[in-house]
Amino acid sequence: MRRCKPALGTFVEITAQHTTIHLKQRAIQAAFDRINDLEVKMSLHCPDSDVSQLNAVAHEKELAVSHETYTVLQESLRLFELTNGLFDIAYKSQNGTSRDIVLLPNNQVTFLKPLTLDLGGIAKGYAVDEAIATLAHHGIKNACVNAGGDLRYLGKTPPLIWTRYAPHYYEQSQEVWVKEHKAMATSFPSENRDDLSATTYKNGATRQTLHSPMAITVVAKTCLLADALTKLVMIMGESSETLLNQLNAVAFVRPVEGLNTDE
């Protein structure tokens, strides 16, 4: 069964299998509700979201955020450190970086200086992971959630889904990666936008908008990680091999015909 609803700046498609139709429908609706809940918490453009509240007052005082937002902030800061600032959710800030984000106990957050956070480069992947977890909680054994190229499987995985991508940084069997890694994300340079914020994504260190003649697909253990790594592979190119290996992920690339990246 497939249902599509707009969320996270894109269409989300959920496919699930269950012998009881109403239980399947209930599980799918719960997964959509979970995605919508996360969008409200992490959207840059919702004035009541955790992100908007942090951007407004966290440089003045400590602020409690949801467990989900706190988790995404933790992962974002981990990637910031691992990449020496290339992945920076504070890239919209003039003088500040993710190094100025302080995570405190009990989901409390404060900033050392005024910042403008944008979780668009990672939150969509997290939402896909949470949708899969919701489906599993409702007894679904086989499912797929696809949010505009951020995709994760539960249970069975089609063995030939990667045949259109050519391995670039690794030589491992494609089918092995499909079976072991059931999450993926793809970034197209012609659509270089993080959908949650509807803005272009930039190199965290240089603040320059990303341009690449390649579409990047990353396969990883979680969609959150795959989502973030597509941007990092676009920034780092072949030098991302060490990072991918460290995070047990693999990248595939393919050229995008007719794309002019010199503009």
Image: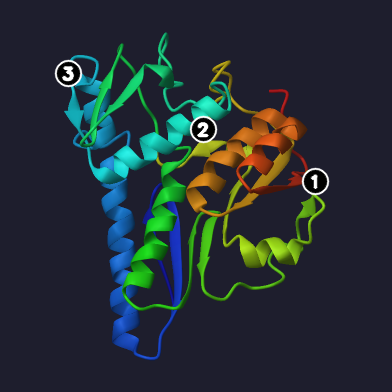
What's the amino acid at mark 2? Answer: Leu
Q: Residues within 10 Å of mark 3 (few under 14, many from 20)?
A: few
* 5 is higher (above) or lower (below) than 29: above
For the point 21% across and 29% down, the residue is 53
Which quadrant of the view contains residue 105?
A: top left
Q: CA distance from mark 1 to mark 2?
A: 22 Å
Left or right: residue 252 versus residue 157 is right
Q: Disc 1 or 2, which lies upstream in sequence?
A: 2
Who is closer to the viewer here, 139 or 94? 139
What's the amino acid at mark 3? Answer: Lys
* 59 is higher (above) or lower (below) than 41: above
Q: Mark 2 — residue? A: 79
**Dividing the image into 4 quarters, which one contains the N terminus?**
bottom left
**Dividing the image into 4 quarters, which one contains the C terminus?**
top right
Count of numbered tags: 3
Q: Position of residue 175 (x, y in %)?
A: 73, 66
Which quadrant of the view contains residue 75?
A: top left
Mark 3 lies on a secondary structure that is: loop
Who is closer to the viewer here, 79 or 216? 79
Q: Residues within 10 Å of mark 2 (few under 14, many from 20)?
A: many
Q: Residues within 10 Å of mark 1 (few under 14, many from 20)?
A: few
What's the amino acid at mark 1? Answer: His
Q: Position of residue 149 (x, y in %)?
A: 56, 54
Left or right: residue 146 versus residue 117 is right
Mark 2 lies on a secondary structure that is: helix
Which quadrant of the view contains residue 76?
A: top left
Label drawn at residue 182: none
Discs 3, 1 touching: Cβ within 8 Å: no
Residue farthest to the bottom? Answer: 19
Q: Mark 3 — residue? A: 61
Discs 1, 2 touching: Cβ within 8 Å: no
Q: Mark 1 — residue? A: 168
